[in-house]
Image (spheres, rainbow, N blue to C red):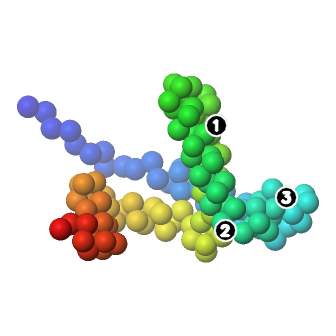
Amino acid sequence: MRHWVRPAFRCVAMTDDRLRRLTETIRARRMADPDTSYVARLFAKGPERIAQKVGEEAVEAVIAAAKGDAKALTSEAADLIFHLAVLLESMDLSFDNVLAELDRREGVSGLTEKAARLSVTDPKQGA
């Protein structure tokens, strides 16, 4: 019987670099003129509007996936990640925070992890 072995390497370096460059670009444009920078315009509208954009992009990604449109899903996923990066920056967070959380969860059953979050947020949920 073959057991699947987890690879000894991770493709994080390339992903971290791309996400880091995206974050740096967002930081550089954050204080730009909102008339000439979409990022600055989003920041000028505040975290609530940025969060709304994340939700809109997530819905568009779901619609593309439901239609089986891989090209549209790829495009919408890029939009979603971009807007999520803007939202994280607006909250003084970064993908490093998100990746650290994913690292913390690694090796933990998704069901176990979700149950732990529910019991912290709503002690009555587990009853």
In which quadrant will I find the N terminus? top left
Sequence-wise, the earlier of marks 2 and 3 is 3
How many marks are shown on the rendered structure?
A: 3
Few, some or many C-alpha atoms within 10 Å of disc 3 (few <14, some 14-19, many ≥20)?
some
Q: Please, which residue is most extreme toward the left here?
A: 1
Select label 1 or label 2 by which is in front: 2
Where's the C terminus, which quadrant?
Answer: bottom left
In the rendering, at what x and y percent does residue 71 appear?
61, 28
Q: Which residue is mark 2?
A: 47
Q: Quadrant of residue 53?
A: bottom right
Q: Is residue 16 left or right of residue 2?
A: right
Instruction: Name the residue located 89 percent from the left edge and 66 percent from the top edge.
Output: 33
The residue depicted at 56 percent of the width and 34 percent of the height is: 63
Residue drawn where x is 81% and y is 56% of the image? 38
- Residue 28 visible from this viewpoint: no
Q: Residues within 10 Å of mark 1 (few under 14, many from 20)?
A: some
In percent of width and height, residue 11 lies at: 45, 48
Identify residue for label 3: 37
Q: Is residue 83 left or right of residue 68?
A: right
Q: Secondary structure at mark 3?
A: loop
- Whole-angstrom CA distance, mark 3 to mark 1, is 20 Å
Q: Secondary structure at mark 1?
A: helix
In the image shown, does 31 or 44 lie closer to the viewer?
44
Q: Position of residue 76 (x, y in %)?
A: 62, 40
Residue at the disc numbered 1 = 75
Does label 1 or label 2 sit earlier along the sequence? Answer: 2
- Amino acid under label 2? Pro
Residue type pointed to by label 3: Ser
